[in-house]
Amino acid sequence: MAATEPIRDKNQLKELADYFLRKGQLRNYTLVMMGTYTVLRISDLLRLKWSDVYDEEKQEFRTHITVIEKKTKKERTIALNPKVLSVLKQCYLHRRGEYIFSNNRKNPKSISRVQAWRIIHAAVVKLGIMGKIACHSLRKTWGYHAVKSGSVPLAVVVDIYNHSSYEITKRYLGITQDERDEAYLGLELF
């Protein structure tokens, strides 16, 4: 399996999200938004239920979600970005079944990882977005932009990804090669 890359161009990320919005595919739009803003692996994202994000008793959306990561078995509490909450509110009006990312069958269940990959892959191809872009790219995209912008302390990014060092996070996000490219291309000696 080839390593995926983050979506480095914010305009392409917006294009990807907007592609689903234009097609009226709110579930898939939500997949891109939540995949990017929550930094969850696709296996954890697809297991999310409406009860994880919406408190039926209080009739309101939660500000945080808590998940046990499938891969690490660690508990994670994630603040829901206002953009994600806005999308969830839209999607909630059209919900089918208990899962946020339900299929369109008579007895809805969550879509599979393969189906999520097909959704993202088909859109990436249609939009002509280059690189090794897949579902895991959404997870990497947030970290890539957080590190490159300097808006999030590096220690926080490393912690969010559960990495043991900044070097591992840089390699995971593809930052190291980008930094080399900038050094080679940005320095004028004559």
Image (tube, helix red, strand yellow):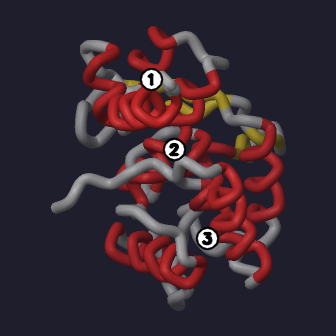
Q: List the residue tagged with mark 1.
A: 160
Sequence-first disc among 2 and 1: 2
Measure the C-alpha gap from mark 2 to mark 1: 13 Å
Query: Which quadrant is the N terminus positioned in?
Result: bottom left
- In the rendered image, residue 145, in percent from the top left (x then y), is placed at 58, 34
Q: Amino acid at mark 2?
A: Thr
Q: Amino acid at mark 1?
A: Ile
Whether label 2 touches label 1, CB < 8 Å: no
Q: Amino acid at mark 3?
A: Asn
**Up-down relation of residue 183 to residue 140 (above or below):** above
Residue 28's disc is: 3
Measure the C-alpha gap from mark 1 to mark 3: 24 Å
Mark 3 secondary-structure assignment: helix
- Single out the mark in the foreground, 3 or 2: 2
Question: In the picture provided, is 113 more to the left or to the right than 49?
Answer: left
- The front one of 119 and 48 is 119
Q: List the residue tagged with mark 2.
A: 141
Q: Bin the neighbour count of mark 2 within 10 Å (Cα to Cα): few under 14, some 14-19, many 20 and up.
A: many
Question: In the picture provided, is 132 more to the left or to the right than 149?
Answer: left
Residue 132's disc is: none
Residue drawn at point x = 47 percent, y = 36 percent: 185
In the displayed orientation, state which residue is furthest to the left: 1
Residue 40 visible in this rendered orientation of the protein: yes
Sequence-first disc among 1 and 3: 3
Whether label 1 touches label 3, CB < 8 Å: no
- In the rendered image, residue 134, in percent from the top left (x then y), is placed at 40, 63
Residue drawn at point x = 34 percent, y = 36 percent: 177
Residue drawn at point x = 56 percent, y = 28 percent: 148
The image quadrant that residue 83 belongs to is: top right
